[in-house]
Structure formats: C-alpha cells, structure tokens
Image: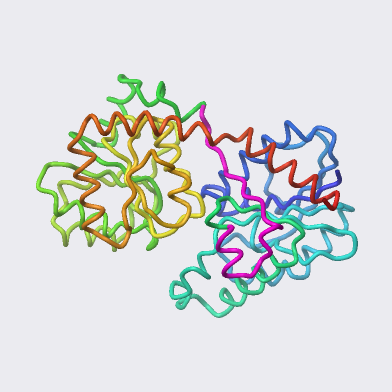
Amino acid sequence: MKICIDVRPLQNAHRTRGVGVLLHNLLRQMGRLAVEDDVTLITLKGKAFPPLFRHERRLETRRLERPNRFNWIADQFLLPELVKKSGAELFFATDFNSYLVPTGNLRVVSMVYDLIPFVFPEAMAAQPLSVKIGWRTNFKKLRYSQGLIAISEATKRDLVSLLGVAPEKIAVIHPGIDHTLFNPDNAGDGERRLEVLARYGIEGCFLLYVGDSEWRKNLRRVLEALSGIDSDLRIVLAGKRALTDATLHGWVRELGLQERVVIPGYVPDADLPLLYGAAQAFVFPTLYEGFGFPVVEAMACGCPVITSKVSSLPEVAGDAALLADPLSVAEIRKALELVSGDADLRQRMSSAGLRQASLFSWERCAAETLAFLRATAGGL
C-alpha cells in the first residue's frame, strides 16, 4: 500500500492532548505492522520526531503553531498538492484541517474524534468568524471520504445524524491505553505512592479528576456536589490549565472548598497511576467526550469510576462505573456519597474496571486501523 499520513498533530499543540496521545501510540504500533508499506508523512517544517515506519519519507509544510485561526485556509491550497506529490493511493487524514475531498484515483480515510462544534453550537458562538467557517468547511468534506474511522459509537452516531455521513462508510475503532504504565502493580506501589502524595500535598481520603478545566468538563457541578457532602472528603483536580484557571479558583472560594480542593497542576504520566491507586474514586462527569482516555486509565489501575451517562462514556465504561446525569448536581452528589461510603462497592467496581479496561489496547487499535485502511485502498 502506498499511503500518505498527516502527522502534524504530533508536532503542534495537539501533541499533549488526547489527539496527540492517540496518534502517537496508534502510528507507532502501525509502524510495527506495516513493514512493507510505502509511507509518506506530511510534517511541519523544522519540527523533527523519530521515524515511525520502516519505509517512510517526509514532505514538509510550513504552518503557524496552533492555535491559529487561518491555518485551515493555507491547507485548502497546500495540502492537496503535497498529497498529490506523495504519489499515494490512500490519504489518512488525522486532523480536521486535513480532511480532503478525494480527486482522481486518490482514496481518503478520515479520523474523526468528536463533533463538539455541531453538538454544542452555542459554544462556538463566541469564536471568530474564520474559525466557524473553517470548522464547517472542513467537516462537510467528510461526506466525500471513502472511509471514516470514528473513535466511538457515539461519534459515529453524531457523524450520521449531524453531518449526514453514510453509516456504512464508518468504522468504529476504539483507542487503547498504555497497559505497561496503567496497571494495578504501578498503582499499588506503596512506597512511591507516599512520596507522590507528599509531593503534591495530598492528605486524607480524596476523589480524583484528571483533565482540562474547560467548560465541557463540568467542574462547577462537581464542586457543587462535593460542597453538599458533610465530610472531610477532598478532591484533587490534576491538569495543567486548572492551576491557573481563575474561574475555577473563584468557584472554589465561592463554595467554601479551599480546604477540600487540591490543584497540583500538571501531573506527569509516571505519577498518574499512583494517584489513581490512592483515590477512592475517579470522577469524570463531563458533558461530552469523543472517547475519554482517563476513564480507561483509572479502570486499568483499579480505581472506581464515576462518569456521565452521555456521549461515548457509557460504551467506554461498560458496566464497571457509576453513571450520572452530568446536568444534575444531585445525581453527581449521590454517586460521590455512594462510592466514597461503601468499601465493598469500591472493590466490586475495581474488579469490573480491570476487566473493562483490558478491552482497550493499542495493538488491537492498530491492527483494526491498518485492516480498514487496506480495505479502503483496495476499494472494498
């Protein structure tokens, strides 16, 4: 197979977010399987990274570091020429700026993570006009891709209902997680756990949240739920933006939770299993997720999970988590009280979570992705 892949999300601001984590692990694993394929990578000029495939070459393009509202316009003209120059029979579009309309004999497979601007149009209202036009222009091209990979059944449903994509063109391929990092042994290392908790100033019984502090993460309702629980139960909000989020810190003061909320900022991956292992529960009642990596990471470490009954989260969590309406503070509070107050329930949830997390591996994700790419390249 002669394939061209856009790997620029591994080089821009996406690299530390879910998209970057997914592509890094997926393409690295695909490189171990696609040993005979002729691969061209579309990269950002001057931004190096290690080889991924045995037979690869790179075509570089200039692009401003994200966020930049006009990058999609440049890609309208530059990217099709680069793909044509690669001589590929298949283009694997991994970013909404790289969604292309197929031309000639070129076939296109597009990776779709979520459709947030279409699910929450009100959230896009404050965006610059150029951003709104870019989203709509690029996502409309998905209707012309010969194949699409959705990272969850929920994303597939959104593609069909919101964009009118033919369902038979869509393959649902769940991402994986790094089981060599997220596992009960790493989570249960007592000596390292004490060191990590002391380093972040975490004491007593606590709940854990890992992620961003943007609006759809629903942290306001989580804090309101916690404030209604009459105990010393704390919550740790781990995430780079949370450390400097003035709105979040304002909520903490407003609700009188200064002594019960710990905000350590960014926590490196090496420390996360210890926090998952020490927490009474992982709390993730977000308003929308294309997949939800932290849910699987927590389960893989044996941490009970409380998450939302919306978007992809029920399919990701299976029967291993407590599901709450993310719009209901009362439901979130009830789940927090139930899990924190019942050690037997936590043990049952931990066991179920380990089984559920075992379903998500990068080996399976890469094998299924490669098979779908080959089938699409062959016109099947």
- What residue is drawn where x is 39% and y is 44%? 266
Q: Position of residue 141 (x, y in %)?
A: 71, 69
Q: Residue at x 81, y 40 (%)?
A: 56
Q: Is residue 220 above or below residue 284?
A: below
Judge by depth and name the residue closer to the eye, 76 or 371.
Answer: 371
Residue range highlighted in magenta = 156-179
Quadrant (top left, top right, bottom left, bottom right) of the N terminus: top right
Residue beneath the point at 90% across and 64% down: 104
- Most extreme residue toward the left is 230
Name the colour scheme. Answer: rainbow
Residue 355, given in percent of the width and then of the height, sits at 45, 30
> Is 304 one of the magenta-colored residues?
no
Q: Is residue 65 left or right of residue 123?
A: right
Q: Position of residue 287 (x, y in %)?
A: 39, 60
Q: Quadrant for residue 132, please give it.
A: bottom right
Whether 346 is drawn above or below 124: the answer is above
- Name the residue nearer the viewer: 246 or 6: 6
Q: Is residue 292 above or below residue 270?
A: below
Asked whether 187 or 151 is in front, the reply is 151
Q: Is 162 colored magenta in this rendering?
A: yes
Q: How many marks?
A: 0
For the residue pair 124 and 376, the one nearer the viewer reads as 376
- Give residue 112's position: percent from left, percent from top: 62, 57
Q: Is residue 260 left or right of residue 280?
A: left
